[in-house]
Image: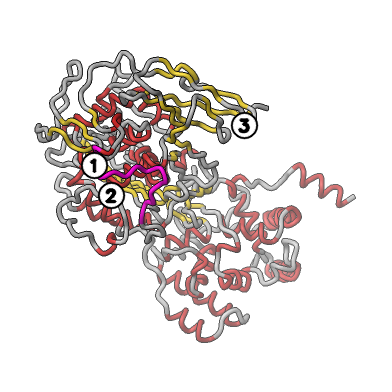
């Protein structure tokens, strides 16, 4: 009957865990290390803490000082309770409360009912009942976790982890005996013993805990002597503040949760210091944003959303902000032309004044170089050749490729269909999106948006250009001219093969640089958040040196070169190229250019295994050649390797081309 009554009361009045569950949002790195935490809705630093999160010496000292029989009792220590009852009978008042860790956990869960310092008999009876209820429902380790998370540590600090980070600047797994003893002592009188305001009182209380530990064999004499001679901390430290922009964004998505990221604390800190050092040298206090991707995993390892986080506009996350990329998208344009087999790095392209309707693109120096190779045109970032190449590729198709790669380009009003100005920066993208594009080039033409959360599915990469086209781009960019001061690469960079491209938006508002090696992609943006111009600050001068310095702080490469795919075409000069690939210059509209009739663009084609897709095109001059993901095929039908997104292109003998993207789905 008594048991039935207890069960009924347990169901009617279950423990209220809402306070324990209302914890700080935590953003952690790939190894679980705290990057940044946020206060709870009631303004507390309350970090989830389990017994595994703290040094065993702390647990031993806690039990020795607070509850020696914690592992044996059921929530209430009968021996301590009898002693307390005898003292109450003898003196007529509660002298010692016989409070166990379980009873303290119950009080911390419902402070509105069990005020600290309240010693009435009824309060103790109710607190004991709650403690028995907690131990009935939960394991010893779970009850201990409640205490470790909620123990008051002075001010708005709650729990052992928050206190360890705030008073000692480290996780509680690394506590010394003296530090552990201090954290055992503080909760008994958190405001009177908080070391940042009452150092001597905190130190005296700590020493009493150490003495108890010595008496019960938790520590030995040398550890005790060392502990009592150590000074207590006299100030409170800030909690970790790595990747503040990213952390704020992720915390808004998952309030109160522990969000696991792909970031690496040591790289985030090292590159954050680099950005801070570079920012300090800028007379106009421009912002610097950086994002670094591990090409092998697709995970972001460093995210610098800007500098001076607490300053004016400092909390704008510039890694996700859309800005004009200037010339930084040119490698992608040339990559698609290489993939269509209408251009080759050694093709000749005209850098001459060309008017496109009402638009006359010019180079930065307003000069033209005449006939140059595509290699030189890209390395020198010449504008007219890039526009001619985009005209060949097709601006709408280029936009479609960007979107398939996970980019959402921003277009000026009235340009939703895409214009040739995209080649020079009229479509805005973010550094985060730019990093995904360059990581796709590093991965041989397979593109996927970078990931930053480890608790969300990783997107499957989509091949948007062939490996040969991506290799051509890397081969060109890895031989681009270095900025001033880098004519001889530093030792840390000599063993790397880094491909890089810069960009500068109109009016010098945005300076970009993107670089990639076999293992890493680094994108840097420099400018003002409000778009204030920075005259003369080219991407090559303002951003590229930071990219190269960042590579000097990244781990060594496990693959120092970009191996050439088997279908790379090597020639001594443009004269050895097929006729259709030898040159590209201003041409009149080609009314007879080929046009793919089937399959249509963005088609969803359901096929059985080994079923062929018929290919047909209208128009064109001479023989039509079909390419699948940049690889030529024979005939006018094609058997897909399996489900996925595929790009089909057709090229005629005059070099005119047409391309579509289709999705192959397995028929069920």
Label number found at residue 478: 2
395 falls in the magenta region: no
Majority secondary structure of magenta residues: loop
Residue 439 visible? The answer is: yes
Query: Which residue is under mark 1?
Result: 573
Q: Label 3, label 2: how many angstroms apart (C-alpha)?
A: 40 Å
Q: How dense is the environment of label 1, judged by Cα within 10 Å: few (below 14), some, or many (20 and up)?
A: few
Between disc 3 and disc 2, the foreground one is 3
Image-quadrant location for residue 391: top left
Q: On screen, 181 above or below 194? A: below
> Which of these two is toward me, 477 or 76?
477
Image-quadrant location for residue 534: top left
Residue farthest along the top direction in this orientation: 591
Q: On screen, 84 above or below 259? A: below
Does the CB distance between marks 3 and 2 fall below 8 Å? no
Q: Mark 3 or 1 closer to N-term?
A: 1
Query: Which residue is under mark 3?
Result: 610
Say what secondary structure mark 3 lies in. Answer: loop
Q: Mark 2 or 1 closer to N-term?
A: 2
The residue under the point 74% across, 53% down is 137
**Image label count:** 3
The residue under the point 42% across, 66% down is 168
Residue 310 visible? The answer is: no
Give the left or right position of residue 405, taking residue 473 as reference: right
Q: Quadrant of the C terminus?
A: top right
Magenta residues, as a range? 561-575
């Amino acid at each position: 009957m008594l048991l039935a009554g207890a069960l009924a009361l347990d169901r009617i009045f279950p423990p209220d865990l809402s306070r324990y569950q209302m914890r700080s949002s935590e953003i952690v790195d790939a190894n679980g290390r705290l990057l940044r935490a946020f206060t709870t809705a009631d303004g507390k630093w309350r970090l989830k803490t389990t017994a595994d999160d703290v040094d065993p010496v702390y647990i031993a000292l806690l039990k020795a000082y607070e509850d020696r029989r914690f592992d044996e009792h059921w929530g209430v220590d009968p021996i301590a309770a009898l002693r307390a009852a005898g003292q109450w009978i003898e003196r007529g008042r509660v002298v010692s409360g016989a409070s166990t860790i379980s009873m303290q956990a119950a009080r911390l869960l419902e402070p509105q009912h069990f005020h600290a310092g309240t010693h009435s008999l009824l309060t103790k009876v109710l607190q004991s009942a709650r403690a028995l209820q907690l131990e009935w429902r939960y394991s010893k380790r779970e009850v201990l976790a409640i205490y470790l998370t909620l123990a008051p540590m002075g001010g708005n600090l709650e729990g052992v982890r928050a206190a360890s980070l705030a008073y000692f600047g480290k996780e509680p797994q690394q506590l010394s005996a003296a530090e552990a003893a201090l954290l055992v002592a503080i909760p008994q009188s958190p405001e009177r013993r908080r070391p940042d305001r009452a150092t001597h009182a905190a130190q005296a209380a700590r020493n009493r805990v150490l003495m108890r530990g010595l008496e019960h064999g938790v520590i030995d004499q040398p550890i005790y002597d060392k502990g009592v001679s150590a000074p207590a901390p006299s100030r409170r430290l800030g909690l970790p503040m790595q990747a503040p922009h990213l952390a704020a964004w992720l915390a808004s998505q998952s309030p109160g949760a522990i969000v696991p990221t792909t970031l690496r604390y040591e790289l985030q800190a090292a590159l954050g210091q680099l950005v801070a050092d570079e920012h300090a040298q800028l007379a106009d206090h421009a912002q610097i944003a950086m994002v670094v991707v591990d090409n092998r995993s697709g995970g972001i390892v460093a995210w610098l959303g800007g500098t001076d986080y607490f300053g004016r506009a400092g909390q704008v996350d510039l890694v996700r902000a859309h800005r004009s990329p200037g010339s930084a998208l040119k490698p992608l344009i040339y990559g698609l032309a290489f993939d269509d087999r209408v251009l080759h790095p050694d093709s000749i392209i005209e850098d001459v004044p060309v008017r496109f309707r009402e638009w006359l693109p010019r180079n930065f120096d307003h000069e033209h170089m005449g006939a140059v190779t595509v290699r030189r045109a890209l390395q020198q970032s010449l504008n007219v050749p890039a526009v001619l190449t985009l005209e060949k590729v097709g601006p709408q198709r280029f936009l479609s490729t960007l979107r398939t790669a996970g980019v959402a380009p921003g277009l000026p009003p009235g340009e939703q269909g895409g214009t040739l100005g995209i080649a020079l920066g009229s479509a805005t993208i973010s550094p985060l999106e730019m990093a995904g594009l360059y990581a796709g080039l590093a991965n041989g033409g397979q593109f996927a948006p970078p990931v930053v959360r480890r608790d969300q599915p990783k997107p499957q990469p989509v091949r948007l250009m062939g490996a040969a086209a991506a290799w051509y781009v890397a081969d060109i960019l890895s031989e681009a001219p270095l900025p001033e001061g880098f004519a001889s690469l530093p030792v840390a960079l000599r063993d790397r093969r880094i491909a890089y491209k810069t960009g500068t938006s109109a009016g010098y508002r945005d300076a970009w640089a993107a670089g990639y090696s076999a293992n890493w992609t680094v994108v840097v943006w420099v400018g003002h958040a409000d778009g204030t111009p920075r005259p003369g600050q080219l991407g090559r001068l303002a951003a590229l040196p930071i990219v190269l310095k960042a590579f000097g702080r990244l781990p060594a490469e496990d693959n120092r070169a970009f191996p050439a795919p088997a279908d790379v075409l090597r020639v001594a000069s443009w004269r050895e190229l097929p006729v259709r690939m030898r040159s590209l210059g201003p041409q009149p509209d080609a009314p007879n250019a080929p046009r793919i009739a089937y399959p249509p663009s963005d088609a969803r084609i359901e096929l059985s295994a080994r079923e062929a897709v018929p290919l047909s095109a209208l128009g064109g001059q001479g023989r039509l050649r079909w390419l699948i993901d940049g690889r030529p095929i024979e005939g006018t039908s094609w058997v897909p390797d399996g489900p996925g997104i595929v790009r089909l292109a057709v090229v005629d003998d005059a070099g005119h081309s047409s391309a579509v993207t289709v999705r192959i789905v397995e028929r069920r």
